[in-house]
Amino acid sequence: MANTLDTSHFWMPFTANRQFKTKPRLLAAASGMYYTTDDGRKILDGTAGLWCVNAGHCHPKITQAIQQQAATMDFAPTFQMGHPKVFEAASALVAIAPEGLNRVFFCNDGSESVDSALKIALAYHRMRGDGLRTRLIGRERGYHGVGFGGIAVGGIAGNRKHFGPTLAGIDHLRHPLDITRNAFSKGLPEHGAEIADELEQRLLALHDPATVAAVIVEPIQGSTGVILPPKGYLQKLRTICDKYGILLIFDEVITGFGRLGSAFAADYFGVVPDMITCAKGLTNAAVPMGAVIVRQDIHDTFMDAAPENAIEFFHGYTYTGHPLAAAACIATIDVYKEEGLFDRAAAMAPYFEQAAHSLKGLPYVKDVRNLGLVCGIELESIPGKPTARAFDVFEKCFWDKGVLIRTTGDIIALSPPLIIDKQQIDQMFGVIADILKAQQAVSRTESVVA
Ligand SMILES: Cc1ncc(COP(=O)(O)O)c(C=O)c1O
């Protein structure tokens, strides 16, 4: 199939297009923990697709809900109209959300959820008569999707540098990754909670707290290589935001829906933000959907500020609450509950941690960091060839070993579906170990030959 397929027309996202098209990696089917490639090979999914298929692929209950909905009503607008499923989906989501977060704005993905949350934050302050609060604070190495709001508060140079000044009035916290002090931490790092203090001591001191609308952080920075919050760090952010009337937004696009063994990272950390952005596992990725889960009084501020019979929030998407997405959302949340998948992830986390840390001491492994069913393995870069070592592991995993991993720079990130079993965990870490040992053997042979 790969030989006959015309790959020229699809401009692929976040992909080295020219390299990919010389030898396409094509997935053709999926079920449970596995993909099947176009040439019929089984691939163990170590990344839940892209951090999103938490209940495993093609779950029959979710598939059936989508099929039924597609046959019953394909589309209905949610501008000045509604359909029952979108209200049911909102209620289902609120039922697993942290207490007090009970109003849901739906959109279509993580990027839109972030941009929607930032708009809600800005408009909320303005509607309260506090319109000076226009600044937004993100974090270095943060990923908040690819909308202009998301790249502005995000902290990834490559995602920003081609696109001009993005939004005005943005600043960034330092990220808390410090492998000189915290390498090979099991779970949360001990050192670095004080980095949160710079929100108050550096950024608020510089900008004046009365001008800041919101701080947005991922509880765990996923896309830039699994950066965990040091113990006490998120609590400190919450305290500082409270002190100055600043909204705290948790971007839980990756951490939501059981990744840490709880519905949301907010539950795991015992820190309740003012808004949660989510997507991905919201529908098990079977239909695109995103959401902002909002504290009720923030929502009510909009309701109270607008004149009667007027639109309260000038924002929304044609596909907000799309019937297929709503049906998938309801079925997915049911599956999480019925199959106890969040508890399952929590129960499997110690085994996963042990397997992850078995890589310590192997060639090129600089750090292993983990929490719940997420793990980052940071490798020494090949001198002069950043990203090449991890990418080689990725390719060998895919072509030779039948395992899908994800890499960012020279960091391997693993985030399997929550249904993974112990033998599959062993397989995933085992093939990475074998490839790293083989890389070292090749490099030794090359240096002898040279
Ligand atoms: C924390 C976070 N926020 C936002 C996004 C963007 O989501 P999407 O790609 O669905 O727009 C991602 C995607 O990985 C993410 O990890």
Image (spheres, rainbow, N blue to C red):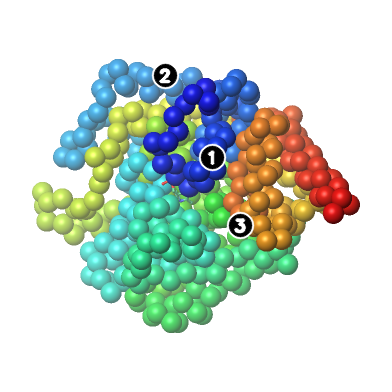
At x 66%, y 32%, the residue is 399
Q: CA distance from mark 3 to mark 1?
A: 28 Å
1 or 2: mark nearer the eye: 1
Classify mark 3: helix, strand or loop: loop
Is residue 448 something that shows in the picture?
A: yes
Is any part of residue 97 visible from this angle? no
Residue 20 in picture, x, y percent from top left: 54, 40
Mark 1 residue type: Phe
Mark 1: few, some, or many residues within 10 Å (few <14, many ≥20)?
A: few
Q: Amino acid at mark 2?
A: Gln
Q: Label 3 sits on what residue type?
A: Ile
> Is residue 107 toward the left or the right of residue 358 in the image?
left
Q: Relative to residue 251, is residue 208 depicted above or below?
A: below
The residue lying at 43 percent from left, 82 percent from top is 206
* Discs 3, 1 touching: Cβ within 8 Å: no
Looking at the rendered image, the quarter that the C terminus falls into is bottom right
Q: Residue at x 39, y 43 (%)?
A: 109
In the rendered view, would you say 323 is above or below 251? above
Give the residue number, with chain letter if any, for mark 1.
20
Q: CA distance from mark 2 to mark 3?
A: 37 Å
Mark 1 element type: helix
Residue 82 x/y as whole percent: 21, 34
Q: What residue sits right under mark 2 in the picture?
A: 64
Tag 1 or tag 3, which sits nearer the N-term? 1
**Residue 329: percent from left, percent from top:** 40, 32
Q: Nearer the viewer, mark 3 or mark 1?
A: 1
Nearer to me, 30 or 303 = 30
Q: Quadrant of residue 347?
A: top right
The residue pinned by badge 3 equals 227
